[in-house]
Image (cartoon, rainbow, N blue to C red):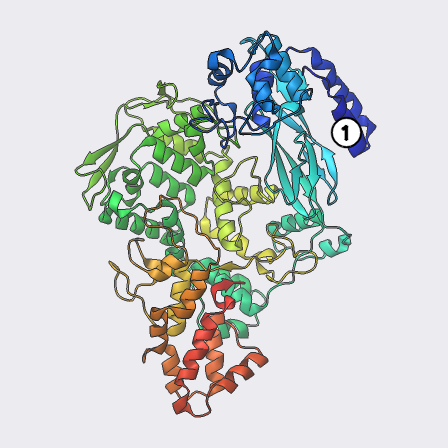
Amino acid sequence: MSFARTSYVIRSLVIVGCLSAVPAIVRAAEKSTEAVTFESDVQPLLTRLGCNAGPCHGKSRGQNGFALSLLGFDSDFDYAALVREARGRRVFAAAPEESLLLRKAVGQLPHGGGKRFEIGSPPYEQIRAWIHDGAPRTPADAPKLVRVIAEPASQSLAPQQQFPLRVIAEYSDGHRRDVTDGAAFQSNDRTIAAIAPAGDGIVQAGPVPGEAAIMARYMNHIAVCTVTIPLPGNVPDADYQQLPRLSAIDDLVWQKLKLLGMTPSPPANDATFHRRAFVRAIGRLPTPDETRAYLADQSPNKREALVDGLLDRPEYADFWANKWADLLRPNPYRAGIKSVWNLDAWLRDAFRKNMPYDQFVRELLTAQGSTWKNGATVIFRDRPEPIEIGASVSQLFLGVRLECAKCHHHPFEVWSQDDFFGFASFFSRIGHKGEGLSPPISGGEEMIFTKSSGQLLHGHTGQPVAPKTLTGVPLTFGPDEDPREALVAWMTDSSNHYFPRVMANRVWAEIMGQGLVDPVDDIRATNPATNEILLDHLANEFRQNGYDIKKLIRSIMTTHVFRLSSVPNDRNISDVKNFSRYYRRRMRAEILLDAVNDVLESEEEFAATPPGSRAMQMWTFRSTSLFLDTFGRPDLNQDPPCERSTETTTPQALHLMNSPLLNKKIVLDTSRPAKLAASDWTNEAIVDEAYLWAYSRLPRDEERRAAVEYLPAAAAERRKAVEDLFWALLNTPEFSFVD
């Protein structure tokens, strides 16, 4: 660095109170005689100060005639913009203090970004020294930056406590350099821990216990420090030791809770667990008879038996195929109606057969043939361009969102444009035959095949790009070889940790209501899992079990963690991602609509679907349904992959209260309320049946008493009251949510 970091040393001593920090910091300060160069010093500083961020000069057209590459991914472009453009006024070597780059940054001239630093501050002196020396670039033969390290890599703090985070750069010649002053920082959860306003590497703990990842960026290299804020107070070790451990999953969750000082909620009761298991495994509510039988069962292993039975039911395939349809289903106006139906049928067949996940992915990504005969081929009809299918595949099956790297270096990861186009090149030899392949279309068969040649051109250089995996190894293929086969072989190889982790996380999120990584398909160092060891365990177990999805589901659903109540205690009430309790989530749209029809004994009519079909069996989002749209099914024109929102909205509440169609179902002569009201059942029996259908439990004494008092004593007069009872039950959170 070109300036001593004495102030940083003082902060370190004051905040940490640790003299052992002095030697390392001093050694970094002693390197202050190194020349200031553009790539090593100035460009990282522009990133730290936000000059090349999206809202400022890093956006596509720049700001007020001055454009920089986003986060400094193009050094040549940035250097030319600073040194050569604007007649050289941005940097003025004869009088560095008169350079626009400095005068605007210190507020001497109008600047839309406001004052970025003060005259005489370390950033000012560093840029001034660079301009004074003739704005040198980093020599081509200079040691290359290999990686950056965050020190410490992890830190435990009390609420509101601080500590200094150092960023160390390691170079190809082995030397290390303290680059904290040139690094940019960002927290993935500022309520737990954030960088202090000065932005100089001081991490400030918030008032909320939990865990946060602090990202440090320097020259497009990233390091992460994990900051843990335990809950104040002590919990005896014996409290954690006596927690049930039905599998290794339980033990790994308890270890994390112990680290955070949290304690789990008690187990949920049998009725709650029974309903939860049905909805999470097969996407439907249990019938009253199923609930009564389960509650009467005194077997010690009845919860495990319930899970096994659910996974063998036919509804399992429809539920999980519906989930994957969100991620793969194309727009019929773009791919053709018959093709979309064929892909949906392929998905349902795969889950009926419990196709191993690696085979599932292999058949999809290497698919050839007719879109009318092989449903797996339809993903290539929907996304015919390599850059489209490449970005989708990396996100879906590897948990790597490469889309950003199509135009610039990924802002939160190591992926570059070379990585993006290298990965997309695996799909550059996919051929298409057929008529009317350009949207909008209404049909037409298409043949997918592998061409003997084909190249993808780099979006920046315009040069052909050889296919390469995300490990950076370029590959070449002969005319008779399909690059997609090599891609899938790399994806499913035992050395590839991306592949099993993203699916394990996806299944965990569906069962537990929250992913270990969220969003589920955005697995990166700067968005770490809330329990990395647990995610690794799930991924390894998934691979060792032959990528059997049912076994993965069973291993999660037979844990004690899955059995926990959703009611918080005083030591986990703030927890939203460490699974100290079960997280309540609203049912997805199709489950909820089917539940309404099951409760009311009614049916739905969907276009292009056989009579009596359930919402979970729909094959296209083009079937009109105001209910499904209100409760969050993907937009008709939204490109997959689509993850459902579980948020509640005012229109959802109003729909359940005021929907004419829902009211019509309730008052039908053939509805369940009408049949129960006309039966010879007692009012007490009717109330019990209504609660079993809606909530999968019997009413509590006060609930039964209030409901019975509302129902007329005479059977001939009670129909409207029974209808009101069902309407009221459907309009409660307990009906719409899974506890």
Asked whether 254 or 384 is in front, the reply is 384
Q: Residue furthest left?
A: 435
The residue under label 1 is 12
Locate residue 84 relative to residue 455 in the image: left or right.
right
The residue under the point 51% across, 71% down is: 294
Asked whether the viewer can see residue 144, the reply is: no
Asked if residue 123 is positioned above or below residue 674 in the image, the reply reads above
Callout 1 crowding tier (Cα within 10 Å): few <14, some 14–19, many ≥20: many
- Residue 678, position in %: x, y? 37, 86
Asked whether the viewer can see residue 241, the reply is: yes
- Residue 93, position in %: x, y? 58, 8
Q: Quadrant of the C terminus?
A: bottom right
Which secondary structure, mark 1?
helix
Asked if residue 570 is positioned above or below residue 216 in the image, the reply reads below
- Residue 570, position in %: x, y? 70, 59
Asked whether 413 or 80 is in front, the reply is 80
- Residue 78, position in %: x, y? 49, 18
